Image: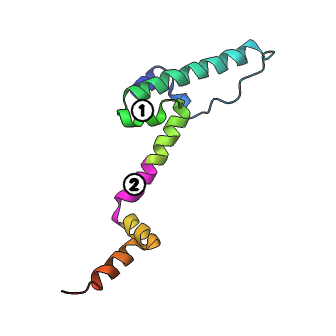
Amino acid sequence: MIVLRHERKWYVLEEPLGEAPPANAPAAARNAHKKHSDDLLDVACLMLATMSPDLQAGLINTNAYDMIRQLRCWDFVRSLYQTDTRKTVISNLTGRDTRQNHMKQNVPKV
């Protein structure tokens, strides 16, 4: 995060790249798009270099903007499964605990 701010590349995590301007667009528009594209690549490489191999494998062909969105989504999903309340809600929705408890209660004693 510090490196991205220092290098003035933090914006690529907050702004999607967008469509490339047409060939007859002003040079400033084409240059701005090229800079954004290059910065996305730089940031994606930096992010991938700091990840575990498992994460790298899943995100290797992803630009930095999409990568941060994906990681935030995974973090949200992970947080759902780490809290007891969420586990209870999910197990109630799936009926997993109910079936397991029912099976334990109805086990014949030998």
**Residue name at image x 43 percent, y 29 percent:** 47
Q: Is residue 69 above or below residue 101?
A: above
Is residue 42 rendered to the left or right of residue 25?
A: left
Give the prevailing secondary structure in the magenta stretch: helix
Q: Residue furthest top?
A: 27
**Residue 34: x %, y % from top left:** 64, 17
What percent of the width, then of the height, locates residue 53? Answer: 36, 32
Image height of 68 relative to 9, above or below: below
Counting from the top left corner in percent of width and height, residue 99 is at 38, 77
> In this orientation, which residue lies closer to the viewer: 34 or 78?
78
- Residue 79 appearing in the image: yes
- Say which residue appears at 42% left-offset and 28% top-offset: 48
Residue 98 placement: quadrant: bottom left
Which residue of the protein is positioned furthest toward the front in this rendering?
A: 110
Query: Callout 2: 10 Å neighbours few (<14), some, many (20+)?
Result: few
Residue 80 is left or right of residue 16, and the answer is: left
Q: Which residues are magenta?
A: 75-84
**Residue at the spot of label 2:** 79
Label 1, on which residue? Answer: 56
Under tag 2, what secondary structure? helix
- Relative side of 85 to 10, left or right: left
Q: Amino acid at mark 2?
A: Ser
Q: Position of residue 86 (x, y in %)?
A: 40, 64
Query: Which disc, if any, is residue 28?
Result: none
In the image, residue 67 lies in the stretch drawn in magenta? no
| Circle 1 residues within 10 Å: few <14, some 14–19, many ≥20 | some
Q: Compare marks 1 and 2 and give the one earlier in the sequence.
A: 1
Query: What is the spatial separation of the Cα atoms under label 1 and label 2, in whole angstroms?
Result: 21 Å
Asked whether 42 or 8 is in front, the reply is 42
Kindly identify the amino acid type of the residue bearing the numbered disc 1: Gln
Q: Quadrant of the C terminus?
A: bottom left
